[in-house]
Amino acid sequence: MISEGLHRFPGGLKLPTEKGLSNGHESLITPLPDEIILPLKQHVGHPAEPVISIGDNVYKGQVIARANGYVSLPVHASTSGKIRDIGLYAVPDALGLKAPCIKIEPDGLDSWCDIQGVGDFASMDPLTLQHVIRDAGISGMGGAAFPAHVKLKEGTQTEVNVLIINAVECEPFITCDDRLIREKPGYIVAGTRMIRHAVQARRCIIAIEEDMPEARDALLPLLDDDIELITVPTIYPQGGEKQLIRVLTGLDVPSNGLPIDIGIIMHNVATAAATYRAVHRGEPLISRYVTVTGHVPSPRNLQVLLGTPVRHCANQCGYQERSGDSIILGGAMMGTLVRNMHMPVIKSTHCILVKRVLNRAPEMPCIRCGRCSDVCPARLLPQQLYWYARSQDQDRLRKHHLFECIECGCCSYVCPSNIPLVHYYRVAKNKINQHEKSLFDAMQARQRYLTRKERLAREAELQSEKRPDTEATKTETQDKKAYIREAVKRGRTRRRKNHGHKGDVSDE
Amino acid sequence: MNSSSAFSSPHIHQAPSVQQVMCQVILALVPGILFSTWIYGWGVLIQCFLAVLFAQVLEAIMLRLRKQPLQLFLFDGSAVVTALLFALCITPYTPWWINLVGMAFAISIAKHCYGGLGQNIFNPAMAAYIFVLLCFPLELSLHPAAGHYPGLRDTLEIIAFGIQGYSDGVSGATVLATLKTGLDGMGMISEIRTSPVFGQLAGKGSEWIPVFWLAGGIWLAYQKIIKWQVPAAFLAVLFVISLIFYWYDDSHYISPLFTLLAGGSMLAAFFIITEPVSSSTTPAGRIIFASGVAIIAYVIRTWGNYPDGVAFAVLLMNFSAPIIDRLTRPKVVGET
C-alpha cells in the first residue's frame, strides 16, 4: 500500500503506535461543560484583545477577542452564554503558569450568532479567501499552532509548487486526525481545495500513513486527479514538516529556512477541515477532535468545544483523577506533562494522554554509544550537543546547529544512559535566546549612555563659556540652543534606527 | 535526574540500559574466554577472575572516594568489561600483583581520574596493558605453549609465586614474538614457520581463538551493541595493507590471513576499538579511527620493537579521536 517513488529521511524510529486503543470508536460529541475558559493566546504570536466585558451575553461563534497584530488570531465564543470573568486561569503549560483567559458560563442553548459561508470560493480572490481563514481564527492544528494565514500569505508572495496536507500522525497514541478523516472526509477534501486556491498551488498532495487504511479508503472516492493521495510508511517523526517534505519530494528545507523557500507549503489535515467549515459555512474554529487515551477506562476520540476543561474531556472517557497518574497534553514523544486537569482544550490540543508509569530510570553518564545520532532525523550529533549544552558552549552549540533540533525525542528514547537530552537542548536554546536578548539590551544601553555623555559634555562646555548677559551672548546662546536641538534630533534618529534594528532580532 | 528534567518529553523510553549493554559485551566474550582456557590452560580463567575481583574492589573504593552512588555505578558492568579485556591481553602466567597493578592503573587512573564512566580519554584496559608492559616486560613475555600447559595447581603456584621453578618446560614466546625474533635474525618466513609454535594459518591452536572473538563480535553487531562498520573497516584495512606487503615480498612479510588471526587483531576489532567512550563518535570518524588503529598496529608489528602493536595503536588513536570528531561532523539536513 505504500506509494512508490518515496524518499527517506535520515534516522527515525519504529515506535509501538498504540493507535488501536482509541481509533476503533466513533468520536463522541462532548456534552457542554459547566464553564468554558478561552485563553487569549492559543497560537504562536501575540495574544488577542478582548472586545467584550464581564456580564455580556455572547452567542456561539461571536468574536470575543480580536487579533492583535499580524501574527495573531481572534478568539470566538465556542458556545452561547454569559461572560463571567476575564482574568488569569491555568493554561496548557508545563510549569502550571496562568495566562489571561475569558470565562464563559454556558446557557445551555448553544445558539449560534449570524454566520454566513462563502458561496463560491473558486471565484474569490486568494487574498480575500485568506482573510476569511484568518477571521475564523484558524491556526495550525498539528501541534505548533502557527496562525494559518501567515503560511498562506507566503503563498501569495512566492510561487507555490506543492501544497502538502499532512495527515501523517506519527506520534504514538494520537488518532484524532485518523478519526477526523474517517468521519469527515468530505470536509478535508473540500478544505484542501480551498487552501489550494488560497495559495494557488500547482500540485497538491494529501499524505497519509500506512497504518491508516480506513482513512485512506474514506478519502479515495472523494478525490479527483487534482489531489494526490500518498501513503507513507510509519516511521517516527515522519509527520514533522521537514521530514515529510523530504519523504514526498526528496528536497531538503534549507537549515534556518522555511518550506516556502523551496516552493512548498504544508498544512495539517485538521486545518483543512477547519478551513472548509469557515469558508463554506462561515463557522469559526471553535471545536476540534481530541484523542483521550492511555490508562483511561474507555479511550476514544472526542469532538470538543475549545475552552472545555481537560478534566471534563477525561470524564467522558470514564476517567477520574488519581494521584500518581501523569497527564500529558500531546503525544508520548513530544507532549507536555501537566500538573492537573484544570486547563482548557485549546486550538493545538490534539491529545490527552494518561500514563500510569512514566520513565523514571536513573540518569547515567553518557557512554558515547552513538545511538542518538543514528536516530536523529536532522542528522545532528545529539551527543556533542549534550556535551556543549552541559558546558554552556554557545558557539559550539550553534556550530552544531542546535536550532535545527525539532525536539522529536528520538535521541532520548534510545539513550541507554536515559539522559533527558531534549531537556538539555530546550534549556540551552532558552539560554541562547536570553543571551542574545541581553546582548541586544546591553548594546542599546551603551548607546543611551554614550548619547547622554555627549549631551552632558556639551552642557558642561556651555556652562564654562557662559558670559555676562549681553546682546551678543544672547544671540550666541540662541545659536547654541539651535545646535542642541539639532544634536538631540540626531540622537533621536540614531536611537530610532537602533530600534528598527532591534525588530530584526527579537520580533518587537 | 533532577526534578524538572523528569517532566520533560519524551515520556516513553525504550533502550537497553548501560548495565545491559555491558552484560551483552561480557556474554559475547565468554565463548572466546572458554576456548582460550582450553588452548592456554587455567591461567586464562584465573587472570580473568583476579582482574574482575581487583577491578570491582577498586571501583568500589574509587566510587566511595569520589562520593558517587555505589549501587548505581558498581554494577554497571563497565569495570568487568575493562578487567576481562585486560586479562585477555596479559599472559596467563602473569603474577597476580602485576594484574593488580594493571587494574589499579585502569580503574583509578585511566577511568576515575578522568571522571569515571563515560569520561575516560583512553581505553582503560589498553592503557593498563601498556602500563604493565612497559613496567614489567620480562614477566609479560612468557606464554604457555598452546595445548601444553600445567595443571590448575601448578598454574596457581606460578601466578602466586612466579615462574622461576618451572621455566623452560612450560613457557615460550608467542607466535608473533617468535616471528619478530626470527625476522630480526634475518630469517625467511618460510624457515621461521617451521617452528613448532606455528599452525596451519597462524599460531598453533591459538589460530582458532579469533574465530570465537569473531562470532561474539558478530552477535554484538547483530544486537546493535557495536557498529559493524568499525570492525569491518579495521579488518579490511589491516588485510589490505598486509596483502600489499605480502605481494611485494612474501619472504619477509607475513600473509594477510596470518595478520588477522595472530595476536590481538580480532579481539581488538570487535571488543577494543568498538569501545565507544574513547573512540570517535561520528559515522565517518569511526571509520577513520578504525583504519588508523589498523595502520598503526601493522606498522608497529612489522617495523617496531613490539611483537604486537594493537594496544599502542588504540592509545594513539584515542588521542586523535576528539579532533577526528570535530573534522568529520556530518552535515545536518538542509545545510549547504
Image: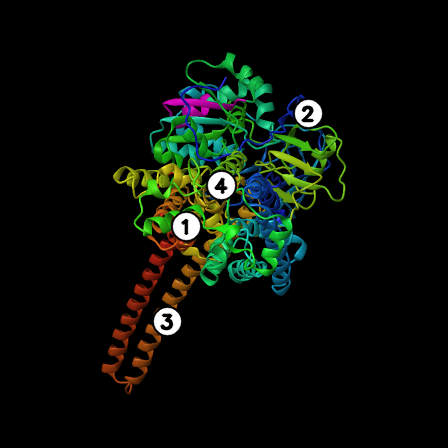
- Which of the 4 image quadrants contains residue A331? top right
How far is disc 1 from disc 3 in space, using C-alphas? 81 Å
Asked if A490 appears above or below A183 in the picture, the reply is below
Viewer-proximal residue, B279 or A146? B279
How far is disc 4 from disc 2 in space, using C-alphas? 71 Å
The stretch in magenta equals A193-210
Which residue in the protein does label 3 denote? A452
Disc 4 and disc 2 in contact, CB within 8 angstroms: no
Residues at marks 3 and 2, common chain?
Answer: yes
**Amino acid type of the residue tagged 4 in the rendering:** Ser
Marked residue chain, label 2: A
SS category of the residue bearing label 3? helix
Residue B10, horizontal then vertical, whole percent: 58, 41
Rendered residue at 59%/19% (across/down): A182
**Which label lies toward us, 1 or 3?**
1
Which residue in the protein does label 1 denote? B177
SS category of the residue bearing label 1? helix
